[in-house]
């Protein structure tokens, strides 16, 4: 609990009452106020997630893949998925809380093939990565303000298909994200 000016004032009043020696009704009132304040989750009454509930995920692609022109990349090897807010079957992260989130993805193009992918928030295309042709990697990092239930994912871009590469056990292509802090 933070030591706010209000809490400091309550302690000071309690101290004055105790010094005067008339600690009866007034002190019990102060004790009740202190008990109520200690039950509070914060001065703004915003419900923040507990440490073990903080959403965070990291997933890799297990097999190289030819992506359709608007296909969502399904990073299917899940390393971390606190809260199970990332779905490896769809490739989509859904925000459980309103807040500020950080996302990162790295993709590798296949030998002799092009790859263009974008990070999406709901139906809005954000940033792109074009690693070029053949065993080149590209990375994007974004900090986003999300509302509860906003969706974030990596999707193939351009008018054609994309060739995404990964090595057996090398995990060249991956996607991760986590909550920096909740907002009200």
Image (cartoon, rainbow, N blue to C red):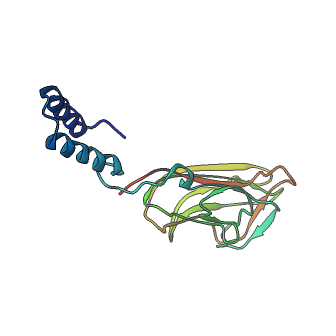
Identified at 72% across, 49% down, the residue is 137
Quarter where residue 70 is shown: bottom right
Q: Is residue 135 above or below residue 152?
A: above
Residue 91, image x and y in percent? 66, 67
Nearest the eye: 62 or 3 = 3
Q: Is residue 154 visible?
A: no
Identified at 27% across, 38% down, the residue is 4
Residue 52, image x and y in percent? 57, 52
Residue 25, image x and y in percent? 15, 44
Quarter placement of the N terminus: top left
Quarter placement of the C terminus: bottom left
Quarter where residue 8 is shown: top left
Position of 183 with respect to 90 (left or right) is left
Nearest the eye: 48 or 40 = 40
Q: Is residue 106 above or below residue 20?
A: below
Position of 82 with respect to 142 (left or right) is right
Identified at 71% across, 60% down, the residue is 115
Q: Is residue 74 above or below residue 21?
A: below
Q: Residue furthest top?
A: 19
Q: Is residue 47 visible?
A: yes
Identified at 72% across, 70% down, the residue is 161
Residue 37, image x and y in percent? 29, 47
The total number of labels drawn is: 0
Position of 116 with respect to 180 (left or right) is right
């Amino acid at each position: 609990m933070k030591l706010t000016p209000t809490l400091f004032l309550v302690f000071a009043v309690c101290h004055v009452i105790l010094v005067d020696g008339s600690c009866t009704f007034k002190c019990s009132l102060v004790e009740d106020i202190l008990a109520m304040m200690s039950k509070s989750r914060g001065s703004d009454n915003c419900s923040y997630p507990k440490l073990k509930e903080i959403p965070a995920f990291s997933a890799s692609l297990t097999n190289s893949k030819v992506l359709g022109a608007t296909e969502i990349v399904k990073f299917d090897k899940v390393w971390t998925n606190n809260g199970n807010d990332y779905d490896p079957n769809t490739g989509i992260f859904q925000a459980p809380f309103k807040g500020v989130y950080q996302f990162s993805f790295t993709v590798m193009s296949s030998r002799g093939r092009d790859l263009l992918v974008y990070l999406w928030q709901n139906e809005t295309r954000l940033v792109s990565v074009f690693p070029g042709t053949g065993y080149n990697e590209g990375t994007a990092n974004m900090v986003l303000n999300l509302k509860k239930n906003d969706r974030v994912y990596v999707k193939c871009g351009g008018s054609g298909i994309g060739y995404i590469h990964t090595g057996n056990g090398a995990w060249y292509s991956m996607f991760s994200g986590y909550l920096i802090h909740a907002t009200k």
